[in-house]
Image: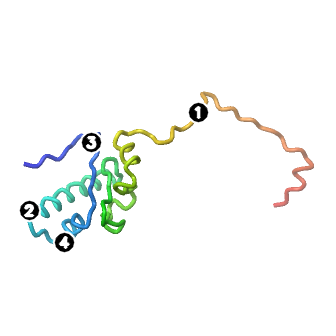
Amino acid sequence: MFFFPQQPSTLIIIAISPKYKADTDGSPSDSHARHAKYIHKLMQNEFIQEGCLNFRFIPVLFLGASQNYVPGWLQNTHVYRWPQDTEDLLLRLFRVERYIPPPVPVELAVIIRPIPMSATTMLRW
């Protein structure tokens, strides 16, 4: 029996390889290919149900695979390459930001300075 995680906090790594591409695009020839195609369709259906927004799926290209092997519905998602993007992939899995944004002050100061009349005459629309 196959268990598909329903927790939205569960991240799913999609290992993309030439074999994965063949299994999901063609007609399945063995049980492994049928399972791969079934799981692929489950993920695609969830993606569509979420309004075509990707919150859980992390595509990872393995050796021998190119960007053309990524399914069409994942084309707008950041694709990681193994082993080149190992650090970025681990940061994504642990939900750690690489760059921490600077803190925003509680009160923003807006300064309005009048433009001298001599400067406005130089502006010609």
Q: Do the residues labelled 4 and 3 touch (CB within 8 Å)?
A: no
Q: How far apart are marks 4 and 3 (CA)?
A: 28 Å
Work out whether mark 2 precedes mark 1 in sequence or the reverse, and give the earlier one.
2
Q: Which residue lies furthest to the bottom in this view?
A: 26
The residue to which callout 4 is attached is 26
How far across and down, in percent of the image, does residue 11 sit?
A: 29, 45
How far across and down, in percent of the image, does residue 52 sit?
A: 34, 55
Q: Distance between the residues labelled 3 and 2?
A: 26 Å
Question: Which residue type carries mark 3?
Answer: Thr
Work out whether mark 3 precedes mark 2 in sequence or the reverse, and give the earlier one.
3
Work out whether mark 1 precedes mark 4 in sequence or the reverse, and give the earlier one.
4
Q: How far apart are marks 3 and 1 (CA)?
A: 30 Å
Mark 2 secondary-structure assignment: helix
How far across and down, in percent of the image, does residue 12 sit?
A: 27, 48
Mark 3 secondary-structure assignment: loop
The residue to which callout 3 is attached is 10
Residue at the spot 24% in from the left edge and 40% down from the top edge = 7
Question: Which residue type carries mark 2?
Answer: Ser
Work out whether mark 3 precedes mark 1 in sequence or the reverse, and give the earlier one.
3
Q: Residue furthest top?
A: 106
Residue at the spot 26% in from the left edge and 56% down from the top edge = 15
Work out whether mark 2 precedes mark 4 in sequence or the reverse, and give the earlier one.
4
Residue at the spot 13% in from the left edge and 59% down from the top edge = 35
Mark 4 secondary-structure assignment: loop
The residue to which callout 1 is attached is 104
Q: Which mark is residue 82?
A: none
The residue to which callout 2 is attached is 31
Residue at the spot 18% in from the left edge and 56% down from the top edge = 39
Select label 3 or label 2 by which is in front.
2
Instruction: Left or right? Give the position of 70 relative to 38.
Output: right
Q: Quadrant of residue 60?
A: bottom left
CA neighbours of label 4 inside 10 A, class few (<14), some (14 to 19), many (20+) = few
